[in-house]
Amino acid sequence: MPARSPKEVIPRKEPVRGRRRRGRTPGWFVLPALGLYVFVVLLPSAQGATFAFTDWDGLNPVKHFVGLANFRELWADPAARGALRQTLIIAVTITIVQNALGLALAMGVHSRIKSRFVLRVMLFAPAVLTPVVTAALWKYMLAPEGAVNSLLGAVGLTSWQQNWLGEPGLALGSVIGVIVWQFSGYSMVIFLAGLQGIPTEVYEAAAVDGAGAWQRFRSIVLPLLAPAMTINLMLSIIGGLKLFDQVWVMTGGGPGDSTETLSTLIYKNAFQFNEYGYSVAMAIVLTVFVALISSGQYGLLRRQERSAR
């Protein structure tokens, strides 16, 4: 008689509920980090927000409750309205120009040119510099006797020489140009990551079907780049709305108030004019303003992203 084979041991299946419970992270595991965040960030922020309802000057220990007087003054302040206008101009222009240029650069370095790796490094290099250093360098180069005007004079374009940061009509555009120059490479990297995730078979199938370059870009590239587009647009709009470093270093909000933003105006009211309560009220309005715009933009972009799938 042939030997009987031992019975196979069939492992007992674990209930789905047990597997889920085993893979779940305990809630108390995040309590130390959450407690530190509440103590370091949330509590000081909440305490600082109470100063918006006082007339505190930032130095005198005595402060008086004034209710909503700071907020009413904010809506009637022409300087605040001008700063809001400049802030919106900067944010919208940066969002459009920086992402359009970043997408064009990503498409260029995604091609099969031999120097694409060197170009990627060179185009991304400005984003590595800190904003203060970049602004200081460009402030020197855009001076009346700086490198930009010297170069224009050397090539015979003396009529193009301008006081780039001293003219109210040119200062805001110069600041925007510097920001776009620095962060277009950052947007390029995000778009490039999205482009590299698109299968080449999709391009080949579209080419076989007779789709041209513009049709492939509109029907394939843009829909599949929706997640990268969402990230870039969110970063650009939020960065533009709270812009401070470059404006403060290059122009200080001038000449006049032509480059004044909400962030620079908050700084001036707090540390130059000693109107700390008023500056905190302005900071609260800026925070709510950024939150509303970014959340609305995110919802719209996510809806478009889902429809493109």
Image (cartoon, rainbow, N blue to C red):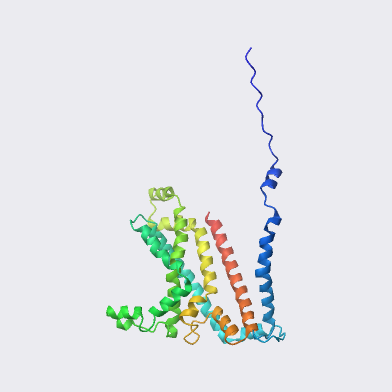
Q: Above or below — where is 74 with respect to 117?
A: below
Q: Is residue 229 left or right of residue 62?
A: left
Residue at 67% x, 58% y is 30
Q: Is residue 263 left or right of residue 221?
A: right
Q: Quadrant of residue 155?
A: bottom left
- Residue 86, given in percent of the width and then of the height, sits at 51, 79
Q: Quadrant of residue 13?
A: top right
Q: Above or below — where is 212 with respect to 87?
A: above
Q: Is residue 168 left or right of residue 54?
A: left
Pick whichever, 228 or 165, lies toward us: 165
- Residue 228, given in percent of the width and then of the height, sits at 50, 60
Q: Quadrant of residue 118?
A: bottom left
Quadrant of the frame with the N terminus: top right
- Residue 53, given in percent of the width and then of the height, sits at 69, 82
- Residue 234, given in percent of the width and then of the height, sits at 54, 66
Residue at 42% x, 64% y is 124
Question: Most extreme residue toward the top, as rendered?
Answer: 1
Q: Above or below — where is 129 with respect to 196?
A: below
Pick whichever, 195 or 54, lies toward us: 54
Q: Is residue 216 left or right of residue 267?
A: left
Pick whichever, 133 or 79, lies toward us: 133
Q: How many marks?
A: 0
